[in-house]
Image: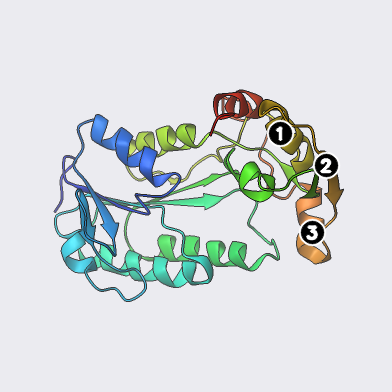
Amino acid sequence: MPTGDSPILVTGGTGTVGRPTVERLRAAGREVRVLSRQPGEGRIQGDLATGEGLEPALAGVGAVVHLAYGGSDEAEHTRRLAAAAAAAGVDHLLYISIVGIDGHPFSYYRRKVEAEEAVRAAGVPWTILRATQFHDFVPRLVGRQRAVVVAPKWAMQPIAVGEVAERLVELVEAGPSGRVADLAGPEQGALAGFARVWFTARGRRPLVWELPLPGASGRALRAGAGLGTLPGAGRQTFAEWARAHAAD
C-alpha cells in the first residue's frame, strides 16, 4: 500500500495547468512522475489512449493528479487511467473538471461529466475539482485577430492558472475529499469585455464585436452556464494578469 510520501503521478504535466502544478509539488519536496508518451527528464512513458505503460507508471504511486486533455476521448482515457489506478492500489485520484458542465450541450463537457462518473466509480478514493476557464483562454480565443475582433457572446469568470495549481497541491496534501467547492475567478464579465482589457494592456484598441453563437451551446454560454459564485476564490483579476503578460 502506498504511503503519504509515495510518488505522485501527474497526467498532462507539461500542459497549461500541469506545469505549474508539477513545479509546486516538487518545490514542496514531493516526488513527481509526469506521464508522457515521449521520454524526457522527470517523465515516465505511458499512453492514456492505449493503456501502454500505465502499470509501471503507477507502481508504488500514492496519488494520481489527472490533468491531461483528452478531447473527444476524455471519458475513455479517464476510465482507463482510473481502472489502472485501482489495480495498482493507488490511494487518491484527483481529477480537474470544469464549472457548469452539468446538462451543458457542448460535447466535450458531456465527456467531462462521463469522466467524473468514471472517477467516482473506479473504487479509488477520489477528489474532483471544477474550475472556471483560465485567464489565458481569452487571448487564445481572440488574441490573433487584428483591427476588428469578433468575440463569441460568452459570460465568463476567468481565474489565474497558478491559483488553480496551488489548490491542486492543497488537495493532494489533504487526501481524498470527494467533490470539493468549485474554483472560480474574482470577477464575472463578457468575453468581449475581457478581450478589450487584454488588447488595452498591449497598447491596442481594436473594434470588438460580440457574436452570439447559435444553438443550445450558444444559449448556455450567454446565460452563464460556466460561471461560479461571487466572490470567487480567485485573487488575481484579469486586468492584473493582462498587465503582467502584456509583453508575452
Question: Which residue is drawn at the image coordinates 47% and 37% (left, top)?
Answer: 164
Q: Position of residue 147 (x, y in %)?
A: 80, 43
Question: Which residue is drawn at the image coordinates 22% and 60% (left, top)?
Answer: 39
Amino acid, disc 3: Gly
Q: Report crowding for label 1: few under 14, some 14 to 19, many 20 or more residues within 10 A (C-alpha).
A: many
Question: Which residue is drawn at the image coordinates 71% and 33% (left, top)?
Answer: 199
Residue marked by disc 2: 208
Q: Nearer the viewer, residue 216 or 15?
A: 15
Quadrant placement of the N terminus: bottom left
Q: Position of residue 134 (x, y in %)?
A: 57, 41
Q: Report crowding for label 2: few under 14, some 14 to 19, many 20 or more residues within 10 A (C-alpha).
A: some
- Are the residues at dot 1 and dot 2 in contact (C-beta closer than 8 Å)? yes
Tell me which numbered mark, 1 or 2, is placed earlier along the sequence: 1
Q: Report crowding for label 3: few under 14, some 14 to 19, many 20 or more residues within 10 A (C-alpha).
A: some
Amino acid, disc 1: Phe
Tell me, for residue 199, which label it has, or none: 1
Snapshot colouring: rainbow
Q: Is residue 230 left or right of residue 163?
A: right
Q: Which element carries disc 3, helix, strand or loop?
A: helix
Tell me, for residue 218, which label it has, or none: 3
